[in-house]
Structure formats: C-alpha cells, structure tokens
Image (cartoon, coloured by chain):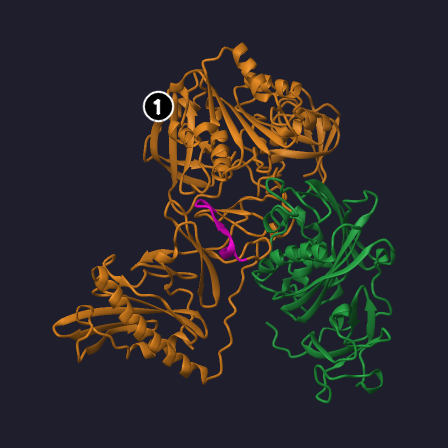
Chain colours: A green, B orange
Amino acid sequence: MSNATHCSDRVALDLWHPVAVIEEAAPGLVHATRLLQEQLHYALFADGTAAVWRAEPALRIGDPVEPGMLPPALPVKLAYGYVWTSLGNPPAELFAIPEWEEADRRRLHAATMGVKVSAPRAIENFLDMGHFPYVHTDILGAEPHTEVKEYDVDISVERDEILATRCRFFQPMASTASSGGADVDYIYRVPHPFCSVLYKSSPVDENRLDVIAIFVQPIDEENVRAHMMLCVLDEDNEDKIIKRFQQTIFGQDKPILENQYPKRLPLDPRAETPIRADKSSIAYRRWLRDKGLTYGVIPAAA
Amino acid sequence: MFDTSPHRWHPIAASSDLVSRHVFHGQLLGREFAVWRADDGFVNVWENRCLHRGVRLSIGINDGRELKCQYHGWRYANRTAGCTYIPAHPADAPARTITNRTFAAVERYGMVWSAEQPEGEVPAVAGMEEGGQLVLRPIPLNASADRVVEHLKSYAFAPSAALDAQPVEMAVEGGGAFSVALLARADGAATRAAFFVQPVDSGRSVIRGMLDALPDGADRVTVLRHHNQRLTELRERIEREAARLPAPEPMQPAIVPVSAELAEMPELTPSGRKAALRVQVARKWQAAEGIAALELRTVNGVLPTFQPGAHIDLHLPNGLVRQYSITNGPGETDRYVIGVKREAASGGGSACVHDTLRVGDVLAISEPRNNFPLRRDAVRTLFIAGGIGITPLLSMALALDHSALSYRLHYFAQAESQMAFADRLAELKGNLVPHLGLSPEATQEKLRETLSGYVPGMHVYLCGPGPMLEAARAIARDCGWPESAVHFEYFKNTHEIDDSSSFEVALARSCVTLQVPAGRTILDVMREAGIDMPSSCEQGACGTCLATVIEGEPDHQDVYLNDAEKRSNTKIMTCVSRAKSARLVLDL
C-alpha cells in the first residue's frame, strides 16, 4: 500500500476527473469532495458555470459563494452531467460521446457509488462479460448461458482508446425496456484510464444503441466514487425505474469489487490468470502499462 | 516483534467453524485463507484468492465437492485445488495446471492447524487428551501475539468443578512463544488450560483456548461463561495497552506469481507419452459381469486434478499401455476409479488387468488428459453409453447431477448384470434410463426415439462400440443435431490405417521440414527429430496428439475429429493421419 499523502503520478494528475454531479449540487454554495487524496471544494453558479479549488480554511462547506470571491481555481469542464477537473495539465478536450447530443435520447445520471477498490479494477469489471450469469443472475445473464463468445479488441493509436467489438452475451433481461431473453450486442470503449463507455442493443430500436458510461473518480489508490451515466432510448419508463435498474446492477458488482485482492490492479502479466474471454482486460492492462500509469495499479516488475 | 517463521504450526480455525458447505475466512501472519471442509471430510486450506481475478474464495460457494468462485463461476476441486471448469469457455478443458495455492491442514484439539512451510508436528500439550477437551470461544484482539502471550501468563480462572472456590492457586505449567499452559487448583479440584495465540497479523491475534476435560450438560455452559467473561476482561486490558502504542505496519505476505505458462493464452505443452505418476491398486472388484474396477491411489503426494471425460494411460506390468476413462464424481480427488472390460479379442491389455493385477500392485500412469470435455452450458444434456462406454459418461453425469443441471443418461447394455458401477448409477435416480438386451435394429430405433426432439442449446455425448457410435451420429444428423452439439469418444480406431503415402511436413514455429516415408507416422518422425509432442492412444481415437494445419490437405484416418472438423482441413491427428497433398504445414 502506498503511504504517500499526494498523488505523484503525472499520468493521473494530467487527466480530467469527474468530481460532482451537476444536478445534485445546490448552486451558490461550497461543496466538498476528494480526488487523488486531495480535499477539493467546488461550487456551481446560476449562470451555468462552475469552479473547483483546493480546499482552504477561509471557505467552509455550505458557505455561500459567488464567482468573484474564489481562491485560485483548478481547470473545469462541464460534460455529460458532471463537473470535471484536473490537478495537472489536462488535454484541451475530454473524450467525445456523440450520442449525448442526439435530441431523442434520455440523458440521466443513474447513480454515484462509493466503492473500496482501485479505479482500474472498477473499469476492468465494467468491461467484463463473463461475470453476468454469476453476479447479475437472471438480469444480465443466467446459467447455463455462460459462454463468452469470441470478440475483437483493438487499441486505436490515433484516438488513444481501447475498442472491443462484436461482443455478444445472452441476457434474460437486458434493460428496463426488454421483455425476454436474447443475445445482446455490446461495444465497449475505454477512452480514458478511469472511464469507459458501453454501447448495447436498444430494445426499442434495432438500428441504434443505448449508451451507458462509467466515470470513476479516484478518491485515493484504493477508494473510488463511480458515476454512472445513461443516454438511452426509452420513452416509457420513469427516470427512477431506469436509475433503479442501474443501481441494482452496480449494487451487485460492489461486494465483488470490494473482495478483490489486491485492490490495486496488478499489471504484471503473471499476477493473475487470463482466459480468452479476458482479451479486453489484457488490452486494458497493456495500455495502462504503456502509458506508464502508476496510480491505483501494481506496476509490472521491471 | 514476534517470530514470523513460516515453519511454525498455528491454529487458524476451530474445527466447529467448518460447518457443512461453509467457507471460513482464516488469516495467519497477514495471509488470508479460504478454509472449507468437503463432504468427504477433507479440510482444504487455500490462498484466499481466485487465480483468475483475485476475488476472495471465502465468499465462494462450497458445494461439498468443489469450491465455486462467486465472480465467474470457476470451479476448484476438493483436495487438489485444481480448476475443473471455466464457464466462459464451456467447450474447453481448463489446463490442469490452473491450481490454487494450498496449505497444510491438520486437525488437533478441536482446531485446524496450518503453516506456510510446516516443519515437524503440530504441538502436543502435556495432560491434554485428543478429543476429550473443551474448546473455548476464540477471542480476537487488536494486539500483537507476543503481547497477548505475556498477559495470558497471568490469566486467572477457577477449576471447572469448583467455579466459586476462593482462593484459586494458579501455576504456569509451560508454554512457548505462542502458547501458555496453566493449572488452576482450588478445593481439591484442578483444571488445566492451554492457550494458543494465533498471529493473525502484526497487530492482530486470536486467543484459542481449551480445557483438559469436558464438563457435563449445563455445567459446560457455566464453565464457558466463566472463561468468556474473564477472557473478555483480559482482552479489554490488552487492547487498552496496545492502543497507547503506535500501530505496527500490517504484514505483506507475498503472492506467488502464476506460472509463465498460465500468464499467456494456453498452448500445447510439449510432452511425449509419459507416465509421470505412480499409483497403487487400493481396491479391485467386479463392477459388473466381465468388468473389473480398479481404485488407484497415489503412492506419495496428491493425484492431479481431473475433469469429467478425462482419461489416463495405464502402463501395465506386461509393457502394454492402455487408456481408461476416470469414472469419479466431482471432488473425488483422493483416488481414480476406472472400469476395464475383458475383451474376447484382447491384445493383452484387458486380460492383464483382469488376471494379473492385484491389490497392492504399483503401476505407472500418465496425468489425466481431457480430450472429451463436458460443456455445462447446455439447456439439456443427453448421454448415450454403449457397454463399457459408460465410464467417461458416468463421471460427466455425476458432475451435472451434483450441480442440478438437466440431463439424461441412456445406458445400452446386454443385461442388467452387465451394467457397471451399479452403486454410482443408483445416485442418478430417474435420470438413468437403461436399455437392455436390444438387437442392433431395436437399438437404432431406440436411438432415433432418444435423439428426436432436438432444440438449440442441447448437447449429446456418445461413447460406446464403433458401430453404435456410427449409427448414433448418423441418426443425430437426421434428427437435425448440428455437428457442434454431438460429442463422441471411440474406444479405439477400427479403421485400417493406410500408411503407404509419403509426403513432406513443415513445422512452422519450429522452422523444420521433415520427410514422412511410407510406413511411418508424422508423430514418429517428429519425435525422431527431437520435437516432443503429447500423445496417448497413438491410434487416432483419444485426441491428445492434435495439431493445427496451416496449409495442405490432410488424409484423415482418425475417429476423433468430427466430419466438419475433417472437412475444414485445419486439424490433424499426427499419430495416424497423413497428407493427400505433397506437403503439410503444421502450427508446431
């Protein structure tokens, strides 16, 4: 376990990180959160802007604030329903999710869950289909339909992201809008070391895909807040029904993730035993290794 | 700091913690264990993480014979800790070498003892009779083991037969770095107590105590309460003292890396026809008319993990090598049971088993190989056995039966007296359907009836005499079964092998080109060139010497590949098959 009080990993410092849900923070007041072991404060304003700064004694949680009276601010972006910031020099743009702009979609913040696990373990679980029949029994999978069929994984150099395609899995109840079992198609993107975007067959329109994303906020190396975003085609169900479905799914993952040992993701190929179904996780671990990321992982032995 | 030697035995659980079908979470010197008792009584102490993705096995499911990981359903066998099934790839047999780390386990004084690399025996305590003592409730504390031992020396209690007596005379009778033996005397009564302190981690311990005698009925509860109260007070005293000092760093036990072979995608392991194991015939009996059963037990160590459908090579005293399927049910890992039919036209193999082998004989066998793996993702599984073909299918049926999966075992035999392993068959209850004394025509009719009603997701496994398998495969085809759902294993290859061709074989990965002349096999020629290749039956039936064809047209002469596989020209059995083209390129 690392005893460092601050993150010194350049790769992690320079990333954009989600730190707050826009719709849940009352405007004009100081709110607090943690990122990479640092205590941060933030505020949203009536004009739709936001500010994030390192916590200072002069401003306390709940104090009213205005844009003009703030300490030196950290970089800020508002995207996909969340406030994003960085403790280093972030890239100009955050990764794109073009579907977010499509007018007929429901855009929802489904849940934020605290999980005692490293951010990369949480992402790897999000990419994994083999656990559906065991962890999400009778929802995303059911025995005896346990096979993970062959799929393709690519690391796109120009986009710097992992893409897993041709993924299929038998699901008894893939979403709130589905009525029976079917092979469901998936595409997974990992455009950011701690974020992943999933595209799955829409039960209401066979030509389009629902989008479910996980944005992981690393509190420290072994604790995260996982933000779940939905961008789906569903005109019938109430928000709370759609949200509850995702909360159920993630609530099933949480105890498994919290029983993974070690909590940080081992990048040494000999730390764990991969099978063909783990192609995407093998690519993800290699991609993190090539980036030189050290936060939340156990680096491979030299 | 106390002695952290990995050689020293420590208690890690009470025997009563290992209740039926439970997995207990133990810890010693910072290392976590999954501790579980199988239905056969064996106590397993394993590293508490699944080799796949590190999830604790202590949250897994003990089904009495195997431990199933909660995350992906991987199954690990009782005793060997070898992985027997990976649900994500139901058609594949997992590499036998996917084996979790196991630790020693000894039960003594109502406790389970373990050590990373034990030396010597579990400590004996003078005056303590095995089995006669009262085990006290374990007391966990936030304090280091050495501190706890020091305090325990001044632990005071009353003799069990005189709990209210005053004064009590206390004496320290013995002890060591992790133990204290005490004697309490009062009013002519005396009770010995022994305490072992389990070093859970640098700053955490468990006091495990016992008394020399078991009081009766209501007295037992009173005695337990007496000690519970005093030990709780002792715990509070010790923890108050420990809390005033800085907490020691937790221990960091090293996780042993998996083998280099397992870290990569599985490849063929190079090995010839080897007999790595020595077993003893522990029992020999008549499993049915004309069928001898052998129970083989290891001479030393543990038998490797088997999966349903696996076979072993048996090296007989007369020099012959024969293949026999393992009939065991899941988790029955302390033995291999095989069934051998006396063949009228015996080449000397079955006659040797029947007439020569006796209990106590030591034999050489190969590790189990599984070229007939069982999928467990079928919506319904049919097993069709003819005669001695029951052996692999019995093991498969027992596995599905234990997991409550849907199956039927159709057993074709001449008479009830010829049905082997009646005791095991009885476990299958209504899922066993015997078909006795049928003529070849009636057999065909029954097969047609059995194989009608195919729905996607069903699988059938066939094992029996050649003509019956040919018929069953043809009927399955007629009934709409895809070839991928029809799995079969022949006893032997009865086709006449035509080895008159000569051709060239290029081994792509070895960068070698070899000439195979008439009269010799690809396998022979490769071996001569120093290229090792696993093999078993060497007559095109078992599937062990399979190679991938990159280029060229094979001349298939085996009975292992199905027709689609043969047509695809991508696989070859190197022990009997040859080339129609002038050249074959193999991925070896």
With respect to residue A133, does B585 lie above or below? above
- Residue B32 is situated, as x and y percent measured from the top left of the image, at 48, 62
In this view, the residue in front, B12 or B367, is B12
Residue at horizontal 42 percent and vertical 46 percent from the top: B302
Residue at horizontal 30 percent and vertical 75 percent from the top: B230
> In the rendered structure, which segment of residues is drawn in magenta?
B56-66
Indicate whether residue A282 is drawn in magenta. no
- B494 lies left or right of A120: left
- Residue B333 is situated, as x and y percent measured from the top left of the image, at 43, 42
Q: Identify the image quadrant of residue B466.
A: top right
Whether residue B517 can be seen here: no
Q: Identify the image quadrant of residue B563.
A: top right
Q: Which residue is mark 1?
A: B355
Indicate whether residue B65 is drawn in magenta. yes
Residue at horizontal 41 percent and vertical 27 percent from the top: B318
In this view, the residue in front, A104 or A80, is A104
| Dot 1 crowding, Cα within 10 Å, few <14, some 14–19, many 20+ | few
Q: Residue furthest left?
A: B188
Amino acid type indicated by mark 1: Asp
